[in-house]
Image: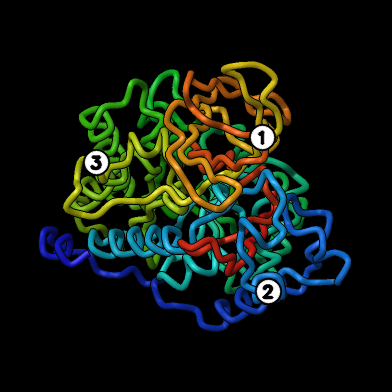
Amino acid sequence: MAAADNAVTRPADARPAASDARPAASDARLAEAVARLADEPADHRFKALPPDTAASGTTLGELAAERRSLFTGGFTTPVLALSAERLEHNLALLADYTRRHGLTFAPHSKTHMAPQVIARQRAHGSWGITLAVPHQVRVARAFGVRRIFLANELVDAAALRWLAAELDADPDFRFLCYVDSPQGVALMDEALRAAGARRPLDVVVELGAGDGARSGARTEAECAALADAVAATGTLRLVGVAGYEGEVPDATLESVAAWLERLTALAVAFDTAGRFAGLDEIVVSAGGSAWFDAVADAFARLPTLSAPALKLLRSGAYVSHDDGHYRDVTPFNRHPEEGGLQAAFTLWTQVVSRPEAGLAFANAGKRDAPYDLALPVPRVVRGADGTERSAQGVTLTALSDQHTWLRVEEGVTLEVGEWIGLALSHPCTTFDKWQAIPVADADGTVVEVIRTFF
């Protein structure tokens, strides 16, 4: 990243917000909870783990310590593998990027829902994490996560009762969520009052990305009305504005930049009107995985506010990146001088049938591979002798529940029993199909098993 460091100038006003101090005690709680995952049995609950581990009572931590080969160490197919080197590269790259651009980072952990990855993101300097639904918040809190941005309006009364108790019990717990409708504000206020909440719930007004986009108030006037509604409650506290630029209809760099200018102007207007009076910091948040360069540019131009701005970026798919959609849309394509993410997943599946010429079947399917953005792509074939060759001439045409449909060109060798390494598209729907994911070094040595909680 040396070239990138020389090529990009950090904004002069990129001062850390008041909440950037690293909470050592919270980090220790997260580390302790993550360490306990190593004590889980490596048994039948987890796809692809070696069957002999169950008989011997081997734990996930012990399995990782054995440094088995992904290919010859007893792992069964299909097996999803995460590259140790590429995972670390991606974590470091976005951490460096956000620091260089004066951004605070709350990576969207709904992508992976893996406490081990959250701990690594924290070790790389993340402020906290972003999540989407109450269950994910409960998982994060079970592992001691101290700062959570919920990129959704929370109107579930049961979840709000639980959240109020969490906030009241832990004064160091910081939680923020969207508000995007007067009805939502009223439901939140009603539930929190019924729960006897003693701490106000911090909220940000969500500016929608345009007509036909996802959630969020559509106009600045609606945003102001929401701020008024929040101020009229005794249970909610307005701390900023936020939104998701990835939902701008027919997004281009120009249209995304225009929407981001609206978002920062909204923050300025709210501040000028005194809506953030008394705050230690003002939250301004956006950022998925396709336009974080535009977010960085817009937030760099944010005028000085009455309190330090917490310029919160929420990208999530960067952790594993991919070989499809996110490879095509990453901002690093526009800014190669700043580095580049690396696709870290390979799904290994085994050829189980060659019923006719030109047709083969492998044993991975929709239960194992993402298919919502694009079908997997065969990249490499591993022969019985361990040698690898290109999968050129082998095309994945469809997925059944537990079968991969492969078209094999004339003259291409593909034998029953051989392994095929598939490149994948969409990190979120890759992670959520696997509860335990082997992390392997470049030579195929498994060095860790990551647990997910979906």
x 68%, y 56%: residue: 436
The answer for how far apart the CA atoms under marks 1 and 2 are is 43 Å
Pointers 2 and 3 in contact (CB under 8 A)? no
x 11%, y 59%: residue: 7
Question: Residue 290's image quarter?
Answer: top left
Colouring chosen for the image of the structure = rainbow
Q: Position of residue 93 (x, y in %)?
A: 33, 60
| Circle 1: element type | loop
Q: Which mark is residue 167?
A: none
Q: Position of residue 197 (x, y in %)?
A: 70, 60
Task: Check disc 1 and give the amino acid type.
Answer: Val
Task: Check disc 2 and give the amino acid type.
Answer: Ala
Number of the front mark, 1 or 3: 1
Does residue 330 appear to the left or right of 123 in the view shown? left
x 14%, y 62%: residue: 3
Nearest the eye: 103 or 68: 68
Residue identified by numbered label 3 = 333
Residue identified by numbered label 1 = 416
Does residue 223 appear to the left or right of 395 in the view shown? left
Q: Is residue 192 visible?
A: no
Q: Is residue 351 above or below residue 4?
A: above
The answer for how far apart the CA atoms under marks 2 and 3 are is 37 Å
The answer for how far apart the CA atoms under marks 1 and 3 are is 39 Å
Q: Is residue 378 visible?
A: yes
Does residue 333 appear to the left or right of 247 in the view shown? left
Question: Residue 372's image quarter?
Answer: top right
